[in-house]
Image (cartoon, rainbow, N blue to C red):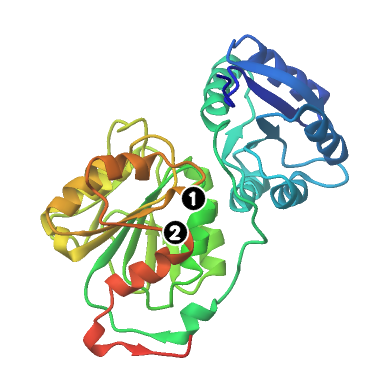
Amino acid sequence: MGSSIRSVCRVLIVDDSATMRRLIRQGLEGDPRLQVVGEAASAKEARDRVKEFEPDIMTLDVEMPGMDGLEFLKRLMLARPMPVVMVSSLTGKGTEAAVSALSLGALECFEKPRFGAARDTFARLADVLVDLSSASPKSRGTIRHGVSRTAVARERRWNGKKVLIGSSTGGVEALETIFADFPHDCPPTLVTQHMPAPFLSSFATRLNANVQPAVRLARDGDRVVEGEILIAPGGDCHMVVDPAGDVLRLRPGAKRSGHRPSVDLLFLSAVPQAKDFVAALLTGMGRDGAEGMAALRAEGAKTIAQDENSCVVYGMPRVAHMLGGVERTVPLARIASELLDATTDESREVQGNE
């Protein structure tokens, strides 16, 4: 009986620089799990190569002549959603553009190799391409910006419960979708998203400009207050809450489940005050957050996981479900309302017109 799963991951390289295309090809061709099936120097060439070779995954540069990588990505995700990894810079405008790409449906952003570090960079890129080639990006329209109908139509009274969210691959778009429906006085919300620190900074700035609540990177000693979404800054630190559950701490430490910041460490730090928290685990590879969610649920926290159909990668939620950590499985489009319901004092809630 045949299988629909290819034994070798077929890669298309898209970059306007012939030198960079050659470097990427040379870096990937030594890996028996990968086959570079084609290259493209422009959006038009990339479109033709996708039709010709039907690759499993694409590497895409942000800046290209004519139609840039972001516009091409937007059109690609509408016409033929497929796994895309951006190969970009981690500085300046390149970082902002890379975060925009993640918002549009790219699965990962990878730093272009620095002098002397190409071998290590491409070894990591090969692993990422193999892991993400089976992901399932969905066809989506443009990302919503500004105030949503849900956010303006509902008056609510906070019941004191705080929100914890963990996310990874596909998480940028998922978080934007959720927070577009959060009101300005949203419940205190703490987020651990797997991304390099420069991307997290740009992501927080982007969110803050496009949603009602205040969004920023967390600082050591921050109080957990209504109307703020605080994002773990990453780098050398994990984000945790103090034993009372109302002050944030940034703690240096080794990676956990391959990640820093770690969702598990955030979730586990809230276990002493579990009944005061609502935890959500979103799309992502691996198992980070699954053990922490199981521990939270066992101690009385409400727990929500994104459902398989709306996940780009149903990894972290799947393991959390296997460990018994998931109370409710919810499509992405409904997670915001679930979180708001769980943090609203029903006896004092006033409903507007939906």
Q: Position of residue 9 (x, y in %)?
A: 62, 22
The reply, left or right, for residue 243 in relation to residue 14 is left
Q: Which element is circle 1 on?
A: helix
Quarter of the N terminus within the rendering? top right
Q: Position of residue 98 (x, y in %)?
A: 63, 45
Crowd around label 1: few <14 · some 14–19 · many ≥20 (10 Å): few
Question: For the point 49% across and 50% down, which residue is it?
Answer: 309
Question: For the point 28% across and 70% down, which residue is it?
Answer: 342
- Amino acid type of disc 1? Asn
Residue 75's place in the image compared with 26, above or below, is below
Residue 214's place in the image compared with 218, above or below, is below
Give the label on residue 309, or none.
Answer: 1
Q: Which residue is mark 2?
A: 331
Residue nearer the viewer, 286 or 163: 286
Residue nearer the viewer, 3 or 148: 3
Q: Which element is circle 2 on?
A: loop
Instruction: State the image quarter where residue 235 is shown.
Output: top left
Q: Are marks 1 and 2 in contact (CB under 8 Å)?
A: yes
Q: Position of residue 7 (x, y in %)?
A: 58, 17
Give the label on residue 217, or none.
Answer: none
Q: Position of residue 248 (x, y in %)?
A: 26, 56
The reply to whether residue 232 is visible in this rendering is: no
Label 1 and label 2: CA atoms lie apart by 7 Å
Residue 291's place in the image compared with 79, above or below, is above
The reply, left or right, for residue 56 in relation to residue 123 is right
What is the number of callouts on the image? 2
- Amino acid type of disc 2? Pro
The reply, left or right, for residue 272 in relation to residue 305 is left
Instruction: State the image quarter where residue 21 is shown.
Output: top right
The reply, left or right, for residue 156 in relation to residue 208 is left
